[in-house]
Image: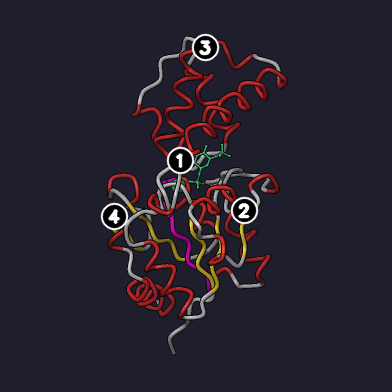
Amino acid sequence: MAHSAELIIYDLDGVITDTAEFHFLAWKQLAEELDITFDRRFNERLKGISRMDSLELILALGGSKTALSMEKKLELAARKNGYYLELIEEISPGHILPGIKTLLDDNKQAGVKIALGSASKNAPHILDMLELSDYFDYIVDAAQVQKGKPDPETFTNAADALGVAYENCIGVEDAAAGVDAINSAGMFSVAVGDQSHLGHAHYRVDDTKDLMFENMIQCFQDWRKI
Ligand code: B16
Ligand code: MG
């Protein structure tokens, strides 16, 4: 008998909307102030990673700067977030990635629960600006998560809160660290993006417009039969 999915946990940045460019510009501004050279290639490593972990990676890139006090690091992280908040002021429903609105509508109509599993402390604010908050049964509070992606906690937190067994959950991600997190949680992983860094997902599409609810459910059921 086919098993049915009970909960789909969506990542935010790179799946629902593309805030990665704004994160990049905000980190770049901070890195320049610290005389650290920072490019788009390095920025790929920050996708899905928490704010403080991202700062540590950037400081390590700059050499000896990792020895800064915690107070100074918190100040730098807050400064970056200030730049980021300025940049995202203009976000509107027009910034929802292609195909996502239909996917959420189909998900809701099928009676499958919906959660947001984002590393971003700004996630509730961004969902509001996208006018998508009403779709979500649960939003993981990034501030409550002890271990960020690739640790499974972001995803297991959502399943625990909604009382769903991990094997009945699907996670949707655009970052390699996020797919690692979903797989370690024992959930079915769906990835959006390139095979070169997302080949470890159970199911992958190139672009959000190719994410079809029925296909995701079909692949999940095939996986559960194994
Ligand atoms: P904030 P996701 C992640 O979002 C971003 O990919 C990552 O670049 C960012 O550092 C992280 O959120 C934390 O964001 O500074 O807003 O708390 O992909 O997990 O939705
Ligand atoms: Mg992401």
**Distance between the Cα atoms at labels 1 and 2?**
31 Å
As drawn, the residue found furthest toward the bottom would be: 1
Above-or-below relation of 154 to 197: below
Which circle marks residue 90 in the picture?
Answer: 1
Helix, strand or loop at label 2? It is helix
Q: Residues within 10 Å of mark 1 (few under 14, many from 20)?
A: few
Sequence-first disc among 3 and 4:
3
User: Which one is earlier in the sequence, the residue at label 2 or at label 3?
Assistant: 3
| Residue 164, magenta (yes or no) | no
In the picture of the structure, the residue carrying the numbered disc 3 is 34
Q: Provide the secondary structure element on which disc 4 rests.
A: loop
Q: Are marks 3 and 1 in contact (CB under 8 Å)?
A: no
Tell whether label 4 touches label 3 (CB within 8 Å).
Answer: no
The residue that appears at 59% across and 53% down in the rendered structure is: 154
Position in image of residue 128 (x %, y %): 55, 53
Q: Which mark is residue 44?
A: none
Most foreground residue, 221 or 132:
132
Residue indicated by mark 2: 153
Answer with left or right where residue 77 lies relative to residue 37.
Answer: right
Q: Amino acid at mark 3?
A: Leu
